[in-house]
Image: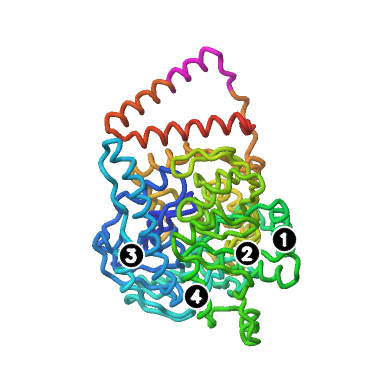
Amino acid sequence: MKVHFVGAAKVVTGSCYLLEANGKKILVDCGLYQGNRRLKERNYNQFTFDVKEIDHCLLTHAHTDHTGLVPKLYRDGYRGPVLTTKATVELCKIMLPDSGHIQEMEVERKNRKRTRAGAPPLTPIYTADEATECTQYFQGIEYNQTIQLFPGIEVIYHDAGHILGSAMIEVRVTEGDKLYKIVFSGDIGNKNQPFIQDPSCVPDMEYIVMESTYGDRLHEDTSDRMERLKNIINATYNRGGNLVIPSFAIERTQDLLYYINLLNDSKQIPPINVYVDSPLAVAATGIFEKSLPYFDDETRELIRKGENPFNLPRLHLTQSVQESIGLNEVSRSIIISASGMADAGRIKHHLKHNLWRPEATVLFVGYQAEGTLGRRLVEGEKQVTIHGEEIAVKAHIENIDGFSAHADQQGLLEWVACTGAKAKGIILIHGEPEAQAVLAEKIKAQSGIEPMIPVLGETFEWVDTGIKRIAPSPEMIAEDEALTREHPTVSQNTRQTQQPQLKRHQPTHAEVNKALMKLRGRIKDMMAKDQHEQDMNAVLEDLQAMTDLVETKIHHGRQK
């Protein structure tokens, strides 16, 4: 048995893992990369495996960083089935075409600039129509149902408690006289979320492939996050501004409506208009309202009493572009719009119209991946570029981690304790390096098992002596190192656990000047190359990225 880590290695997006066993190749997730330019470029690359050799595809849940490249899989020739929960099938039927539409719109906007610059046009990774067409191959199953994919290969889907229909995938592989039990965690849910069940324990797993998104931090508890949400709504309303909330269309938007409804019913906030400006979120809310079997006991009891958790007074669901544009004129309102990391979709327009207003607030309620607009705003940037226009950041920027649908460090450790009591190996994926380093130390202290952290393209092979690690190709090693150099951040927790280092060499002025001259030369070479290729957009983006880095150093200083 082998597992190839072809995505989400040392990063939070782009989940994709290739399992080989008994002569079959099974893909677990096939997600889009989100974040900085280098990460997004991976979406346009050829798959590192032969698509036509894949026998089956398994999906953990509907978020696009786990499903967003499935249409590309079919575009490149895959015609096998996609197995996932019934709720995920329904959500993918709306999410994937929406993803294709966003890509078409983004490419159309970029091509207008490229045409004026004389550059060749770009093509979208896939279209909305192609995404719709591929969903005909999706097959829905229930939780806790044993499915034999092939002789000697069985899978069981367990409730991950992350979003509606999310799953952990237990895989049982029999090769000869050996039985391997491995679980792919998907995204492990945060406990006590509205609507859905808490994450399942999958006992007796020998090998665990688990996410590590919040491996280095803890969430606020429910009472704290509700108090903060109330205070942010009231303060923004009293200033006369809008509260703009970038939010994932699935789960997070519905959770926010639930909490705002609670605050409204208890009269802790003033009567306020709430706009959900995302056709995808509107469609997803409709799916939620028909998903009673997936809900937790509390939500079922509310519905049994005739109470609709989505029946919020002054709630407006906007569908058309004209309705969305009309929100430019509103004030003292809450605007919830996708995407949650502010990287695409209608939310960018609302940020463009509200970030410069000191009376407004932008509230982030989920993880912001490295390189996204959301991450830059959370980290304090005072000027950002949206659709080619420089926008001053004068609005209040707030962040409440407690609304995250991901388990925090404590939740991850609790899940390892119940799932991995008999584990022989733990593998950390879907996390940034600093979060993985901290979580690995915590897991080792708790269980005595030292987790393994694969790099992009690495292969783990199960042999008689344990797991054999096979290095990726030189090209993939170079790509992974380049990404690490681009974002060499280390969290405070990680720095505290590192061993004391030797005193560093104190450079001379001559060495600094030499390094500066070398940098100037490399920038000149880069600009000459891009200009020769008539890619002025690339020149501008690269220069802006370097300027942003320098400005960040000036404003915030270097980490000591």
Judge whether residue 31 is colored magenta: no
Q: Tell me residue 10's x, y (percent).
A: 48, 49
Please state the extent of the stretch shown in magenta in the rendering: 505-519
Q: Mark 3 or mark 2: which comes first in sequence?
A: 3
**Element carrying mark 3:** helix
Q: Tell me residue 262's x, y (percent).
A: 69, 71
Tell me the distance, in whole angstroms, between the alpha carbons under discs 3 and 2. 34 Å
Q: Tell me residue 338's x, y (percent).
A: 50, 58
Q: Amino acid at mark 2?
A: Asn
**Element carrying mark 4:** helix
Q: Mark 4 or mark 1: which comes first in sequence?
A: 1
Q: Tell me residue 404's x, y (percent).
A: 60, 60
Q: Amino acid at mark 3?
A: Ala
Tell me the distance, in whole angstroms, between the alpha carbons under discs 1 and 2. 15 Å
Q: Quadrant of residue 103?
A: bottom left
Q: Mark 3 or mark 1: which comes first in sequence?
A: 3
